[in-house]
């Protein structure tokens, strides 16, 4: 279980960070994570969509159905103030964690 | 707001579903386009997109899980539970009926206790209402002069003072003649009580009751139905009451009962008539007024208004009789019995649920193994018992409604006199019902849910592999439940047996007279039925007619008939023994004709009976009376004085008449005076062989010969005695019913749980029998289970009953808790039930065929 939680936490962080740039839909978020991490991080749909809905249920994201180009309906997510605060807190945690790991690795 | 989202999600499930579909479809479309951008053919692009997505349905399910969260799962559980309960009706029907019975009995009992004890006066702020009267050293005045009442209206601290004085009245509507209780009330009474609204018509106006405005009447809903056949045009109609023609101005609701429960008519009065009309004062005190101070002022006001009250002081009494000794003791006990029955039934449902949940061990184990959390399993189990509880509650309200209806018609009159509450299942009762329902559901459902879901997934699967058996914990709990049930049932049965035997003893107790074949009746003579001079002639005529009735061979006139007491005379009795002290006691005085003693077979122990020439001052006294005034001496020829009524001369001593009561203070000594002339309400006793004609025959006979005389109440005296026993009989009947319910529940619980255990242990029994255990041995094995539980329960129950016996002692008559007959009955009945309930499952276990079992596997 701790492993999943850890991964889940990371995925939440990635999603929140992606949305800082502006509202986006699921596919866009997925593409963007992949792009920015230079294909190093690939998020599966099976994890992405539950995560999006979970974050929305937690009040960190809001969403609305929009008609997009070529007449398809897409759900567009945007960051809420709560989401922004959570992103800051999680990013700080992550940086502290990453720093700690780096120090351990360098010490070796 | 999240809850709003969740509820919206639940309500708009289809829409939410479609949105998820759209969202995922959009993703795949975008992916496909991106693939085409990389140069794939349209088909290949779409295929690659779908492949990379890896299972649309799965993703959808995952999203749905997140979105719809708890409510949705609750909804699913609810549907699932409803489906399961419906399918397993063999389990559901007994469980729901037991819950409904438990809830229904609790509600009905609460309604009765509420009406009799908690809220006998169902008016606005009843604690400020009281009956106000004047009292002194030697008795007092319950009725006051109208000026006193008016003075009280102006007393600071008294918000309102009104009068309501009831009497019986002869009512005539067309050809119907009936007697009904009527109350003369001051018009402000209804406002003072508060919350009285007529069903039809109106209440009295402030000026009604003045001369010229007093020919109005309000009638009860009951009178409207019985006398007017619920005619919608009743308001405005004219009825004759005691010879006066009164116009009906309104109909009061059935729930309104004042000043007593059986009042059917109300007419207005301003207490301004010239004849000395008196007031029976009811007051509403001002909120927060110090009661002592107000009473002091009321006393002063009364003294100023009426010089005759100079030596008296104002005093308050409650609006209704306080419960008598018997009710005061019986009600808490019966309430306690209801609580016991309630828990027996809950324990039973608890046992059933537990057995059922352990039966689904495998299901729960599997679900736990694939990741369902404990909380999720508990939720499912609780939803099921919650649904069961809800069904129990629904039917419970119906059961309560039916029971209260029965109680209302069966409650004896002396009990009804103690309340003005109409005994409806009202908001308070429903609140109690809901509380009982929730309590029952929790009591029955929580433990099984907690224990039944306490599953180690691995263990469960392993056990499941072996065919499964109850866990040790569930089994121990089941046993404890059964022991609790048996002991509660045992306590109830002991209580019921003692009450029933008391009732039987009371009914059989020596009454000091013989009433088989005797009927007594009350005659009601209108004031117009002859003057004093013509009364003896009328009496002779009546006697002659009554003798014509089939079977009648003895007639006696009297005022007062057993067991209804005669005239209660309370005061100081002074014997003619020199230097003797007056004896203060209550005595039953009967006015009787000479034939009374031989008719009732009351032996004259000493002296003689009356003859026609005896003056009013010649009396016959009972043994107890003689013993009280002339201890150890012969009373015949002696004289005594009673208060200011003069000197009486004893001509004979009779055997004592015993009044059947647990309360010895109700059984009074009696003395008899000659019945000189027929009053306006004489009583006739008839001895017939073998039994007297029906009331209807007697009434018809009278109606033909004496149309102006009405026969009030022609009832065999046996039945009158039985009616006096109504309260002990009601207690015994109720307690027996509760005990029976508990016994049936115990038998059912024991049977179902043992049967269930046998099915769980079929393998074990099969192996035992394959290894050579005889059927008898296996049968004994199962029987032992039941008998051990029964024996422990019986022991605990007997101990509890022994401690409770002290409280029960006041309701007992001629039996003690250690009564061997009662003990034998209780022990015998419970043993039979335990053995009977265990023997069927034991038989089932002994006939398991190992070969059949092997083939099944």
Image: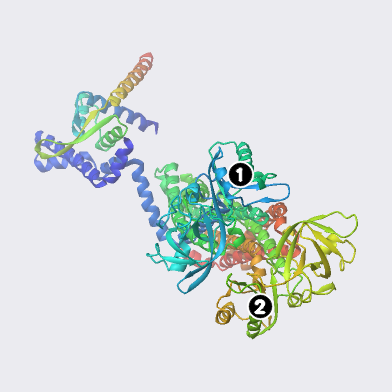
Where residue B557 appears, as percent x and y from the top left, is 69, 74
Q: Residue at x 21, y 42 (%)?
A: B19
Compared with residue B31, is residue A95 higher up or lower down, i.e. above or below? Answer: above
Mark 2: which secondary structure? helix
Q: Residues within 10 Å of mark 2 (few under 14, many from 20)?
A: some
Between B800 and B51, the residue placed more toward the observer is B800
**Given this view, does label 1 or label 2 mark the residue nearer the observer?**
1
Residue at the top extreme of this rendering: A107
Compared with residue B20, is residue B106 higher up or lower down, i.e. above or below? Answer: below
Query: How is this picture coloured?
Result: rainbow
Give residue B539's mark. 2
Distance from disc 1 to disc 2, alpha carbons, whole Å, reads 45 Å
Compared with residue B367, is residue B101 higher up or lower down, i.e. above or below? Answer: below
Left or right of B244? Residue B613 is: right
Chain identifier of the residue bearing label 1 in the image: B
Between B476 and B32, the residue placed more toward the observer is B476
User: Residue B311: in sight, yes or no?
Assistant: yes
Q: Which residue is mark 1?
A: B305
Between B514 and B558, the residue placed more toward the observer is B558
Mark 1: which secondary structure? helix
Labelled pair 1, 2 in contact (Cβ < 8 Å): no
Where residue B111 appears, as percent x and y from the top left, is 53, 54
Give residue B72's mark. none
Do the residues indicated by labels 1 and 2 lie within the same chain of the protein? yes
């Amino acid at each position: 279980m701790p492993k999943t939680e850890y991964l889940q936490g990371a995925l939440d962080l990635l999603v929140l960070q992606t949305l800082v740039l502006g509202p986006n839909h699921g596919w866009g978020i997925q593409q963007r994570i992949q792009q920015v991490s230079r294909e190093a991080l690939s998020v599966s749909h099976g994890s992405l969509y539950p995560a999006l809905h979970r974050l929305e249920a937690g009040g960190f994201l809001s969403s609305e159905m929009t008609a997009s180009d070529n007449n398809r309906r897409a759900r567009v997510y945007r960051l809420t103030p709560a989401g922004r605060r959570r992103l800051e807190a999680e990013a700080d945690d992550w940086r502290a964690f990453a720093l700690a790991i780096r120090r351990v690795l360098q010490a070796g | 707001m999240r809850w709003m989202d969740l509820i919206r999600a639940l309500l708009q499930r289809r829409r939410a579903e479609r949105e998820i579909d759209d969202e995922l479809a959009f993703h795949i479309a975008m992916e496909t386009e991106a693939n085409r951008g990389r140069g794939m053919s349209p088909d290949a692009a779409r295929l690659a997109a779908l492949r990379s997505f890896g299972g649309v349905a799965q993703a959808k399910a995952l999203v749905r899980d997140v979105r719809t969260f708890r409510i949705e799962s609750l909804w699913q559980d609810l549907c699932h539970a409803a489906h399961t309960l419906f399918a397993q009706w063999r389990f559901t029907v007994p469980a729901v009926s037991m819950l409904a019975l438990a809830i229904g009995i609790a509600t009905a009992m609460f309604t009765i206790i509420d009406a009799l004890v908690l809220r006998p006066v169902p008016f606005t702020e009843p604690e400020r209402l009281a009956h106000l009267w004047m009292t002194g050293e030697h008795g007092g005045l319950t009725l006051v002069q109208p000026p006193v009442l008016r003075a009280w209206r102006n007393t600071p601290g008294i918000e309102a003072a009104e009068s309501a004085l009831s009497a019986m009245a002869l009512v005539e509507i067309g050809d119907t003649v009936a007697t009904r209780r009527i109350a003369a009330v001051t018009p402000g009474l209804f406002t003072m009580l508060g919350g009285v609204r007529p069903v039809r018509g109106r209440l009295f106006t402030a000026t009604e009751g003045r001369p010229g405005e007093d020919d109005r009447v309000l009638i009860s809903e009951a009178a409207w139905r019985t006398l007017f056949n619920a005619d919608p045009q009743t308001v405005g109609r004219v009825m004759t009451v005691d010879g006066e023609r009164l116009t009906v101005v309104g109909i009061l609701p059935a729930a309104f009962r004042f000043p007593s429960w059986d009042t059917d008519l109300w007419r207005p009065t301003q207490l301004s008539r010239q004849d000395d009309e008196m007031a029976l004062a009811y007051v509403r005190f001002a909120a927060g007024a110090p009661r002592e101070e107000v009473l002091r002022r009321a006393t002063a006001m009364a003294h100023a208004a009426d010089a005759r009250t100079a030596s008296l002081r104002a005093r308050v009494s409650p609006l209704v009789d306080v419960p008598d000794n018997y009710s005061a003791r019986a009600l808490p006990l019966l309430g306690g019995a209801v609580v016991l029955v309630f828990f027996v039934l809950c324990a039973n449902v608890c046992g059933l649920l537990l057995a059922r949940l352990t039966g689904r061990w495998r299901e729960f184990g599997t679900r736990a193994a694939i990741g369902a959390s404990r909380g999720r399993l508990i939720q499912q189990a609780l939803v099921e018992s919650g649904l069961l509880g809800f069904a129990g509650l629904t039917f419970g309200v119906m059961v309560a409604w039916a029971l209260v209806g029965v109680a209302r018609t069966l409650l004896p009159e002396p009990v009804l006199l103690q309340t003005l509450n109409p005994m409806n299942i009202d908001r308070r009762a429903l609140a109690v019902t809901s509380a009982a329902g929730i309590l029952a559901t929790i009591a029955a459902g929580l433990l099984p849910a907690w224990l039944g879901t306490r599953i180690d997934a691995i263990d469960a699967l392993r056990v499941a592999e072996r065919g499964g058996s109850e866990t040790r914990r569930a089994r121990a709990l089941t046993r404890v439940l059964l022991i609790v049930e048996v002991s509660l049932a045992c306590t109830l049965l002991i209580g019921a047996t003692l009450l029933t035997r008391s009732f039987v003893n009371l009914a059989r107790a020596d009454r000091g007279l013989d009433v088989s074949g005797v009927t007594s009746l009350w005659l009601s003579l209108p004031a117009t039925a002859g003057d004093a001079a013509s009364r003896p002639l009328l009496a002779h005529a009546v006697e002659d007619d009554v003798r014509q009735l089939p079977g009648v061979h003895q007639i006696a006139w009297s005022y007062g008939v057993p067991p209804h007491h005669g005239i209660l005379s309370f005061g100081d009795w002074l014997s003619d023994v020199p230097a003797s002290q007056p004896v203060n006691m209550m005595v039953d005085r009967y006015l009787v004709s000479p034939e009374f003693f031989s008719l009732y077979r009351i032996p004259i122990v000493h002296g003689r009976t009356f003859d026609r020439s005896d003056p009013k001052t010649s009396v016959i006294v009972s043994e107890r009376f003689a013993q009280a005034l002339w201890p150890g001496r012969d009373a015949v020829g002696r004289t005594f004085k009673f208060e200011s009524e003069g000197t009486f001369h004893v001509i004979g001593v009779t055997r004592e008449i015993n009044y059947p009561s647990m309360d010895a203070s109700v059984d009074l000594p009696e003395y008899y005076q000659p019945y000189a002339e027929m009053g306006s309400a004489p009583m006739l006793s008839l001895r017939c062989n073998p039994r007297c004609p029906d009331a209807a025959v007697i009434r018809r006979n009278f109606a033909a010969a004496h149309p102006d005389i009405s026969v009030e109440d022609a009832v065999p005296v046996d039945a009158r005695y039985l009616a006096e026993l109504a309260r002990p009989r009601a207690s015994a009947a109720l307690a027996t019913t509760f005990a029976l319910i508990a016994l049936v529940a115990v038998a059912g619980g024991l049977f179902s749980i043992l049967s269930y255990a046998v099915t769980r242990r079929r393998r074990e029994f099969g192996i035992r029998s394959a290894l050579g255990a005889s059927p008898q041995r296996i049968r004994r094995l199962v029987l032992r289970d039941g008998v051990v539980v029964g024996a422990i329960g019986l022991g605990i129950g007997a101990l509890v009953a022994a401690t409770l016996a002290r409280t029960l002692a006041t309701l007992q008559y001629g039996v003690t808790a250690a009564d061997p007959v009662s003990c034998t009955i209780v022990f015998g009945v419970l043993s039979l039930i335990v053995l009977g309930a265990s023997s069927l499952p034991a038989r089932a276990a002994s006939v398991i065929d190992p070969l059949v079992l092997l083939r099944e596997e």
